[in-house]
Amino acid sequence: MLILEEFLCRMYGSKQMKLTNAMRSALFSKTYNFMDKDELFHVNAKNFDASVLPPCQSELRQHFLRTAYIANVWKNAHLQYPTTMSPTEYGWQEGDGMYSFKWLESDQLPEKVDDIVLQEDRSNDAIENPDDSPENVERQEDIDFDHNVSEESSDDDDDDDDINDIEDLSQCSTALYENSSDDND
């Protein structure tokens, strides 16, 4: 996993860092540079785009597990039973008869952060849902439209090289999973 993390750090522009969690911290600190460690966090983070940060190590591992599973299915798509692998062991979780992404195995927030974050009281039904505001509904429609357009434009990509890439990715991801299983034992 270390090689993949180092590769990801290089994709995000760092030649010195080799761990994604350290890279995330450095990018965040670079954006919100504090002069004093005791300085309170008073930064207006409304314009912060979290998509510029690489995924954390736990999220990255789940993504590679899902990639290994999908690559294995496509590699064996010509067989009657393309895979014997269980999706729940490869970055998916089952609920309501459907599979969804398993994003993290660890806590989403560190305990120190979770202790200081104010949690909104959801017991009052009279609170208006901010997601239902006209601006958010309009923005969601734009996002859905952009997603549909990108799906239509990506249907034309049919190269034989893609099959080789999938096989290489499947082997790499399977090796990653086996190594991580050995580390956990």
Image (cartoon, helix red, strand yellow):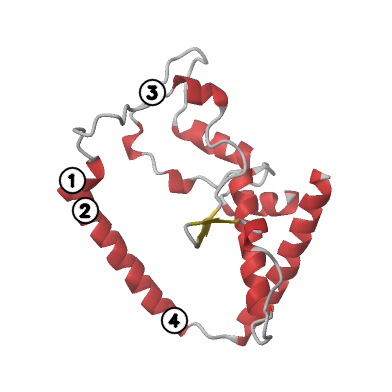
Q: Which mark is residue 152?
A: none
Residue 132 rendering spot, x and y as whole percentages: 21, 47
Of all residues, the one furthest to the left in this rendering is 134
- Under mark 4, the amino acid is Asp
Element under label 1? Answer: loop
Q: Is residue 106 above or below residue 66?
A: above
Element under label 4? Answer: helix
At 66% across and 87% down in the image, what residue appears?
78
Q: CA distance from mark 4 to mark 1?
A: 34 Å
Element under label 3? Answer: loop
Can you identify the residue that label 4 sits on? Answer: 155
Q: CA distance from mark 1 to mark 2?
A: 6 Å
Element under label 2? Answer: helix
- Under mark 3, the amino acid is Leu
Can you identify the residue that label 3 sits on? Answer: 118
Is 98 left or right of 147, judged from the image as shown?
right
